[in-house]
């Protein structure tokens, strides 16, 4: 669910004035990272297109007709950002949905560049600490030449962890580890339109846009907003963060409901979504 957290951080950066608009481009925000000979169309890719997975970058998730080899080659690269920006665009920006880990990682880099500090440091000061999420002693190992099994095990046993790429940028697509209670706070923040107690951490307009189907028709078909999944289920509008192996932040605004599940569906063989949709949501009444 790291992608969703990155989407939240973009909203925080906009509210904080670190970013000006979701229409800012890679040419403006990551000009110093663009390699020689980069596809000229890359300079026109906007933050919004990265958020909606319509940047034109080729998809790398098999479940969405992508090529997982693209993700593997990025992990093996000595410079992930330049590797991503060195790829030719598969389609024109804004035209097609393609689920892309690379898009989310670029958003993390944008947060770091715009705030002049590591993404975790910015998140800690402007999102996590205000929500009462403690990150002291967080494990932040660097990934070089792929994810080392021993490092992965260490992160899995840590209360808070977030891996970084070879240049030190926190991986925007995965590896952030938080407790279930902490994840529920993120869902509650968005349930309340970006407000936490007396703090408006994310603008209500951004939250509304992020949790509504956005972009062109492939986006609408996939039910993907701005790094949240959006649907109408059991007659209710819902939005959710979904993580590999059975992780969920599932929000039903009309029921004032936030449900969080952390699990390993690969081991249990059960889809937590079934528990949410068939048991928890029907049990809640307004």
Image (cartoon, helix red, strand yellow):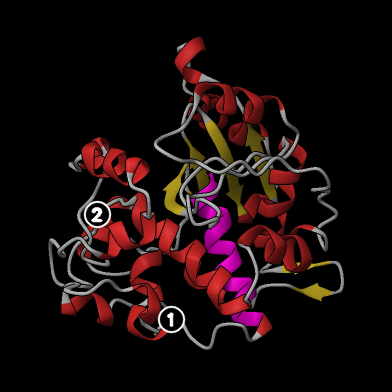
Indicate the position of residue 117 as horizontal and vertical percent values: 65, 70
In the image as oriented, which residue stretches furthest toward the top?
268
Give the extent of the magenta segment: 1-15
Q: Is residue 284 left or right of residue 229?
A: right
Q: Nearer the viewer, residue 260 or 108?
A: 108
Give the secondary structure at mark 1. helix
How far apart are the alpha carbons under marks 1 and 2? 22 Å
Q: Quadrant of residue 37?
A: bottom left
Q: Nearer the viewer, residue 219 or 5?
A: 5
Residue beneath disc 1 = 29
Viewer-side label of 1, 2: 1
Residue under the point 19% across and 60% down: 87
Q: Quadrant of residue 17?
A: bottom right
Give the secondary structure at mark 2. loop
Residue 273 in magenta stretch: no
Label located before the other in sequence (1 or 2):
1
Residue beneath disc 2 = 98
Indicate the position of residue 158 as horizontal and vertical percent values: 72, 31
Crowd class of label 1 (few under 14; some 14 to 19; many from 20; radius 10 Å): some
Overall secondary structure of the magenta stretch?
helix
Q: Is residue 226 left or right of residue 17?
A: left
Q: Quadrant of residue 5?
A: bottom right
Residue 4 in magenta stretch: yes
Q: Is residue 16 left or right of residue 125?
A: left
Crowd class of label 2 (few under 14; some 14 to 19; many from 20; radius 10 Å): many
Q: 129 above or below 260? A: below
Residue under the point 22% across and 74% down: 36
Q: 101 above or below 118? A: above
Q: Nearer the viewer, residue 126 or 182?
A: 126
Indicate the position of residue 30 as horizontal and vertical percent values: 40, 77
């Amino acid at each position: 669910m790291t992608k969703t957290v990155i989407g939240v951080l973009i909203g925080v950066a906009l509210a904080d004035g670190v970013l000006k608009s979701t229409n800012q481009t890679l040419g403006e925000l990551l000009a110093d990272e663009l390699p020689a000979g980069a596809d000229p169309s890359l300079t026109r890719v906007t933050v919004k297109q990265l958020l909606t997975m319509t940047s034109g970058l080729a998809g790398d998730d098999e479940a969405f007709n992508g090529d997982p080899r693209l993700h593997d080659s990025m992990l093996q690269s000595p410079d992930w950002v330049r590797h991503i920006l060195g790829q030719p665009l598969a389609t024109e920006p804004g035209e097609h949905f393609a689920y892309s880990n690379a898009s989310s990682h670029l958003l993390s880099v944008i947060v770091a560049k715009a705030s002049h500090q590591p993404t975790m440091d910015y998140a800690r000061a402007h999102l996590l600490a205000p929500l009462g999420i403690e990150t002291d002693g967080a494990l932040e190992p660097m990934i070089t030449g792929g994810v080392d099994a021993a490092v992965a095990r260490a992160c899995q046993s840590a209360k808070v962890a977030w891996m970084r790429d070879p240049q030190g940028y926190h991986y925007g697509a995965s590896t952030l580890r938080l407790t279930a209670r902490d994840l529920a706070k993120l869902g509650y923040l968005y349930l309340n339109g970006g407000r936490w107690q007396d703090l408006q951490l994310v603008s209500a307009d951004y939250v509304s846009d992020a949790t509504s189907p956005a972009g062109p028709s492939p986006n609408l078909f996939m039910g993907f907003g701005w790094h949240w999944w959006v649907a109408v289920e059991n007659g209710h509008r819902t939005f959710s963060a979904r993580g590999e192996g059975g992780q969920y932040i599932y929000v039903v605004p009309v029921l004032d409901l936030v449900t969080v599940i952390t699990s390993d569906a690969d081991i249990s063989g059960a889809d937590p979504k079934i528990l949410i949709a068939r048991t928890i949501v029907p049990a809640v009444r307004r």
